[in-house]
Image: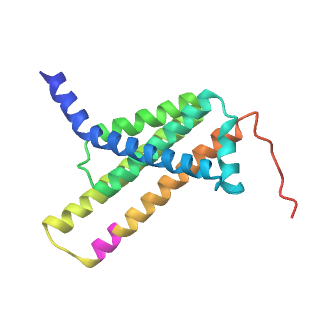
Amino acid sequence: MTVKIITNIIFKFLAFFVILVMIGLVVVKTILSKKEVEGKLSTNKTRLFGLFMELDNLSILSISIVIVRFLFIVYSLIFRSELNFLQLYVLIFLSSFYGVTTKSIKNIILEVIGSVAMYIGLYASMMLGNYIQEIRFVWYIYLGNIFLIIFLVLYALYFFFKSINDVVSSSKYIRRVRNEN
C-alpha cells in the first residue's frame, strides 16, 4: 500500500518535469539539426559544440546530470510546485551522483551542501509566496521574495557553470589556451 502511494507521488511530481525536459530536448535537437543542414551555425556556436565533442562518456553523464539538476531547480521556481522531501531527495541524489561521476569526495560534499541550501531557499520562497497569497500582501515581503528568486536563479547558474567548467577542464582532450591580448 505505501509503495503505491510513494509511486503515485513520484509519478505526479516528476512526470510533468520529465515531459517538459523531453519536449525541450526535441525542440533544441530540431533547431540545431535545421541550422546544421542550412549551414548557419556560426563559428562561436561550433566551438561551443566542439567543446563537448571530445568528452568521454562519464563526462557527458556528468554534464547531463548538471543540466537536469539546473532544469529541476528552474522548474521548481517557475511552476511553484508544492515542496516536499521528494524534491530534496532528488536534488541530493543528483548532486551525489554528479560528485561520484567526477570521482571527487570534495565535489560530493560541496554539491550536497549546495543542493540543501538551494532547497532551503526554494522552501523559503514558497513560504513567502504562500504568506503573500493567503494572509496578506505586503510590498516589502513581495519585493524580498522577488530578490530571493533572483538570488536562487543566480545561485543555480553559478553551480551550473562551475560544474560544467569542472567537467570540461578535467578533460584530457581540452587544450589550455592563454589569452594573448
Residue, far bottom: 139
141 is within the stretch colored magenta:
yes
Q: Would residue 177 appear left or right of 109 to someone viewing this image?
A: right
Q: Main secondary structure of the magenta part?
A: helix
Say above or below: 18 vs 78: above
Q: What residue appears at the point 65 percent right and 46 percent down from the top-left corner?
A: 49
Rendered view: 146 above or below 152 = below
Image quarter of residue 62: top right
Residue in the image at 56% along x and 39% along y:
63
Using the image as rendered, state which of residue 153 and residue 44 is in the foreground. Answer: 44
Q: Is residue 60 magenta?
A: no
Is 7 positioned to the left or the right of 181 in the image? left
| Relative image position of residue 25 (x, y in whole percent) | 45, 44
Q: Is residue 9 left or right of residue 107?
A: left
Point out residue 42 in the picture as x, y percentages from the top left corner: 68, 57
Residue at the (37%, 54%) spot, across then down: 121
Quadrant location of the N terminus in the rendered image? top left
Specify whether residue 138 is in view.
Answer: yes
Position in image of residue 119 (x %, y %): 36, 48
Stretch of the chain drawn in magenta? 140-145
Q: Quadrant of residue 126?
A: bottom left
Q: Which residue is more in the foreground, 147 or 157?
A: 157
In the image, what residue occupies the spot 69% across and 43% down? Answer: 50
**Residue that lies at the very extreme toward the right in this rendered image:** 180
Residue 72, percent across and down? 39, 46
Residue 103 can be seen, yes or no: no
Answer with the quarter of the image where residue 77 lies: bottom left
Q: Quadrant of the C terminus?
A: bottom right
Residue 142 shown left or right of residue 33 in the figure: left
